[in-house]
Image (cartoon, grey):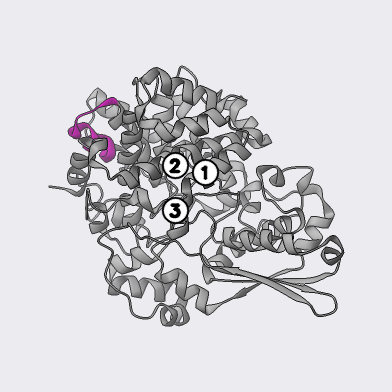
Amino acid sequence: MTLLEELTGWAAKLTLDQVPPRVVEMAKSQVLSQLAAIRGGMAHPQGQTLLRAFGTPLQPTAKKAATVLAGLTSWLHLDDTAYAGHLSNSTVSVPFAYAEACRLDGTALLTAIIAANECAARITASATLGPFRGQMAAHTHLAGAIAARLHASGAPAGRWVDAFGLAFAMPIWTLTHGFMGSEARMLSSALPVRVGLAAVDSAAGGLSGAPDILEHPKGFLATFAQVPVPTAITVGLGDRWHTETLSFKVHPSGPGTDTAVDCALRLHAELDPDEMEAIEEIVVRASLYTLMVDKAAAEYLDGPRTPVSALVSATPYAVATALSTGGLTPADFTAPATDDPARWALAAKVRLVHDKEMTTILLHADAPFGEAIRAAGERGAAWVRDFGGPLLADLLGPIGPPRASFEDAVKATPAAVSVHLAGGRVVEHRADVPVGGIGPDTRASHRRLVRGKFLEAGGPAEVADAVNDLERLSASEIGWFLRTALQR
């Protein structure tokens, strides 16, 4: 049995009563959080451009609706993450798009989302130790779109294998320059969703795909992973739920930046206006991960002319905005906010410093890297050495075994922000896990967090209330739920 045959054989038969209640609750929060992200994208000028190109989020043509719903969310970094991957742009958006055509009730909608999460996250995890992670891993959405649509339509497992085999014969290779330096990032999930849906249609029409496309010596993992972890695709099916590793984004900011933004927001509340004028320097201590992402974005910074694709990953701009305004919203990534010279002047006072302890914490957390390193064992340790040199290998230290369960998963992207004022006063805040990042706090409060995110995006309170009983809604009620959630 190939990896695809084992994974899809399990996913095709998944029912909601097989999913632990705590995992179902995470998926319900994922639904509301993704609706908030879609609303945030629609409110931004670039989102309006996408709507002009492809139409409204919910429309009779489900494929076009899926494209729009996927494209509205990722580029502002309001989409949620998991171990491993930015799942919701495909795993939630595609069931939304096909809800009417497939007459999905709440139970069917949630089950399709969870099945898609598990397929997309597992395939993404198997290639995490490679050139593509996060939003640049377009293959996440090939898997998410295929699994979501096929589960929603009740397709047999054999069709899943063919659709995956077709799509992963030609996975998308993302180019950093276009991703960061243009508006192409808006299509980073929309295009793979379209390819995945085309593969589903092709399989339904009778085309067959290679069932061993993932593990074959000339297949996906051999090309897309420097250290393949094929066991991640099938280990613990039904016991290890990637859905419960979800981290919820409460403000738009790139990977590794969100914790620094949280610290800046807390500092804003402590500083009075006179002290804001007296800021001499802002020091952000963070892991090497945050510094590397910021360095990649910095190449494309050009003041108000900076592409949004790069700006959302630029730590100085996000920290300066949060510190000066007390918030960070989609409106901060377009004019007039991006034309504010005072904001750019404050951003110029931000200095990033590598903190070795924080890098160690990041490497040992489950997300974004730790579980992949543990699953790869000594090969994972070697990858760390090749990726970051002897220093990073020393900071990693001994690695333990992979997790049997994600019930206690943690995503840590530590940061500390120190504001140095004229006269010598220094105020600082530190956090290891961002607000909404998976860990004990988010497991206890995710429902409240995503409700706040949805309402802040202008979402109706009746939708935020209805998500609590999502699995009990009929197909017609799901139609009402989605239409009401996305009306503006």
Name the element at disc 3. helix
Name the element at disc 2. helix
Above or below for 418 versus 446: below
Q: Amino acid at mark 2?
A: Gln
Q: Which mark is residue 316?
A: none
- State which mark lies toward you, 1 or 3: 3
- State which mark lies toward you, 3 or 2: 3
Q: Residue at x 31, y 29 (%)?
A: 108
Q: Earlier in the sequence, mark 1 or mark 3?
A: 3
**What are the residue bounds of the magenta stretch?**
153-165
Disc 2 + disc 1, Cβ < 8 Å: yes
Q: Nearer the viewer, residue 236 or 220?
A: 236
Q: Amino acid at mark 3?
A: Ala
Q: Residue at x 49, y 32 (%)?
A: 465
317 within the magenta span: no
Q: Position of residue 184 (x, y in %)?
A: 57, 42
Per the image, the residue denoted by label 3 is 444
For residue 439, say whether it is visible. Answer: no
Q: Position of residue 132 (x, y in %)?
A: 43, 56
Per the image, the residue denoted by label 1 is 450
Per the image, the residue denoted by label 2 is 30
Q: Amino acid at mark 1?
A: Val
In which quadrant of the rendered view does residue 164 lie? top left
Name the element at disc 1. helix
Position of residue 50 in the picture relative to residue 126 (left or right)? right
163 within the magenta span: yes
Disc 3 + disc 2, Cβ < 8 Å: no
Q: Earlier in the sequence, mark 2 or mark 1?
A: 2
